[in-house]
Amino acid sequence: MDAAGWDERYRGSELVWKAEPNRFVEEELAGLEPTGRAVDLAAGEGRNAVWLAERGWEVDAVDFSAVALEKAGRLAADRGVRLRTVHADLTAWAPAEAEYDLALIAYLHLPWPEMARVLPKAATAVRVGGTLLLVGHDAANPERGYGGPQDPRVLYTADRVADLWRPYADVLRAETVTRPVSDPEGGGRTALDTLVRAVRR
Ligand SMILES: C[S@@+](CC[C@H](N)C(=O)[O-])C[C@H]1O[C@@H](n2cnc3c(N)ncnc32)[C@H](O)[C@@H]1O
């Protein structure tokens, strides 16, 4: 979906996603000392970026949807924290090297050749010793999980992400993880996500 499509999806006062952080973001990063600057790539309405800011990180929230970033700014203000919102298409994003202590990517789904350009940029944007975390819908999800994008060209595998980060970082976790979700009738289902965590070398 292009930026206009995402703007349309985000228009309206309701949040498309929740205001609380993603469970894996919380589990992985709650114990990480807020040592400085974090970047949330494809931050959307800011649920994860705001949570990081609340924990003491200085956060840049990057997204190509201006509507999403406006909502992220409002969520931050409601919660009494500051976010720096950056309106940018990640396929053309050119961060300075070693600018951040933490880079987060949560549920950004692009065709793989584009993802393969974004992921190394995310890695080099992080200083040595800094953390990289990616969470997204797994390639096995359409067959064995529930919900999420169904197009295999935009889905992750832990190995593919880890392979792109290994030249820059030590990979600590690279696996498929399960997330309980509800179907429209309120029934319990399980979604499969990719989770990769690495430390910049
Ligand atoms: C599924 S949402 C995830 C939002 C947020 N990370 C979260 O977990 O709540 C995907 C986000 O990616 C953004 N996005 C998609 N392609 C993008 C691109 N090329 N550049 C910047 N943002 C993009 C969309 O605008 C949308 O906000």
Image (spheres, rainbow, N blue to C red):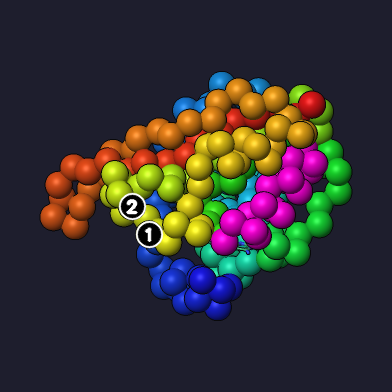
Camera-nearest residue between 48 and 76: 48
Which quadrant is the C terminus positioned in? top right
Q: Is residue 119 magenta?
A: yes
Q: Could you say which is closer to the camera, residue 23 or residue 201? A: 201
Q: Which one is earlier in the sequence, the residue at label 2 or at label 1? A: 2
Say if residue 124 shows up in the picture.
yes
**Residue at figure coordinates x 55%, y 78% from the top left:** 4
Q: Main secondary structure of the magenta part?
A: helix
Secondary structure of the residue carrying tag 1 is loop
Residue 156: give x, y in percent of width and height: 51, 47
Task: Specify few, some or many for label 2: CA neighbours under 10 Å numbering under 14, 14-19, or 20 or more.
Answer: some
Which segment did they paint magenta?
111-126
Report which quarter residue 33 is drawn in: top right
Q: Is residue 201 above or below residue 121?
A: above
Tag 2 near tag 1, CB within 8 Å: yes
Amino acid at dot 2: Pro
Query: Does ligand 1 reach within 8 Å of label 1's beta carbon?
Result: no
The relative height of residue 149 versus residue 20 in the rendered view (above or below) is below
| Circle 1 Cα neighbour tier, 10 Å, few/some/many (<14 / 14–19 / ≥20) | some
Q: Amino acid at mark 1?
A: Gln
Circle 1 residue? 150
Instruction: Name the residue tied to disc 2.
Output: 142
- Compared to 120, does 75 lie above or below? below
